[in-house]
Amino acid sequence: MNQVIETILNHRSIRSFEDKLLSKEQIETIVKSAQAASTSSYIQAYSIIGITDQEMKKKLAEVVGNQPYVEKNGHFFVFCADLYRHAVIGKMEEKDVEPSIESTEKFMVALIDAALAAQNAALAAESMGLGICYIGGIRNNLEEVVKLLKTPDRVIPLFGLAVGYPAKITGQKPRLPLEHIYHENTYEANEEKYTKELEEYNEVIKKYYLERTAGKRSETWTEQMGKMLERKSRMYMKEFVADKKLNLR
């Protein structure tokens, strides 16, 4: 155990921030930490947009589902899969890069690069005593988000990251047991074993919700996931991504 691991294991989402902006130095440190993440073949297929305009933050908060912590935080970052600069590189170097840029593989690279960079940013922020919350609601209405951020073709805003000084510290949600996540050598697709482990985890989550809500909520994890996955959400994504000239081949 060391300070880095303690920071990682102490993570919880923060949705209530003090009315205090991050300094320029803090923002730069967070972005530089993001850039230090591993990147496939040095491609660096992501961009980060920092939202400093309060009116824009307010509009984004409305677009993503009226989430107040998108508007009220120390700083709001939007992480984007970005292959636009690589299209520019193709012109600079007079190379036919379009088939590669439009491939599923490069789209996956851009998604992974952005996720790795974001997690570095989150850990950097938490190591400074700040709180963070990922905002997947960015993808609720990407047409509006793209208009607000003026992102070009081959760029997809993926998620936001609200960062700030925590006004309220919430409890940690228990994760799945290590044995359920970690497989040795091969994937153990034993449905009976999976079901048993999930039933045991359900009891842990049920107890967590009962304690957190003073008995008002007793939902299990599989109940929660079943309800969520039964609802169709963001089903426009395939067409949207293709319209942005990504994931075409």
Image (cartoon, rainbow, N blue to C red):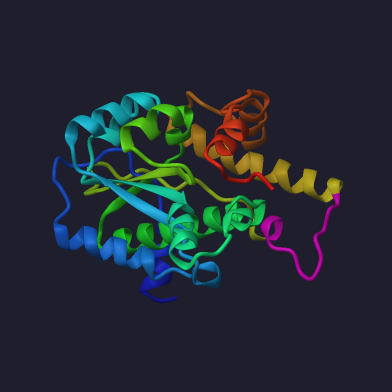
> Which residue sits at x=18%, y=42%?
18
Q: Is residue 45 above or below residue 19?
A: below
Where does the image place residue 75, in percent across and percent down from the top left? Answer: 23, 46
Left or right: 187 as drawn, with respect to 148: right
Image x and y of residue 41, in percent: 55, 72
Which secondary structure class fits the magenta region best?
Answer: loop
Quadrant housing residue 144: top left
Q: Compared to 5, does 237 lie above or below? A: above
- The question of residue 186 being in magenta is answered with yes
Q: Nearer the viewer, residue 3 or 57?
A: 57
Query: For the N terminus, which image quadrant?
Result: bottom left
Q: Position of residue 214 (x, y in %)?
A: 43, 29
Q: Which residues are magenta?
A: 179-190
Q: Is residue 1 above or below residue 197?
A: below
Q: Nearer the viewer, residue 236 or 84?
A: 84
Give left or right: position of 200 versus 98. Answer: right
Residue 219, placed above or below residue 153: above
Tell me if residue 128 is in the magenta stretch.
Answer: no
Along the horizontal axis of the image, is 5 left or right of 109?
Answer: left
Count the numbered circles shown.
0
How far across and how far down the image is residue 90, in percent?
A: 50, 61
Looking at this view, is 139 or 231 the one in front?
139
Tell me the residue at 30%/51% (across/down). Answer: 131
Specify the farthest residue to the bottom: 2
Q: Quadrant of residue 187?
A: bottom right
Q: Is residue 103 left or right of residue 31?
A: right
* Nearer to the camera, 98 or 22: 98
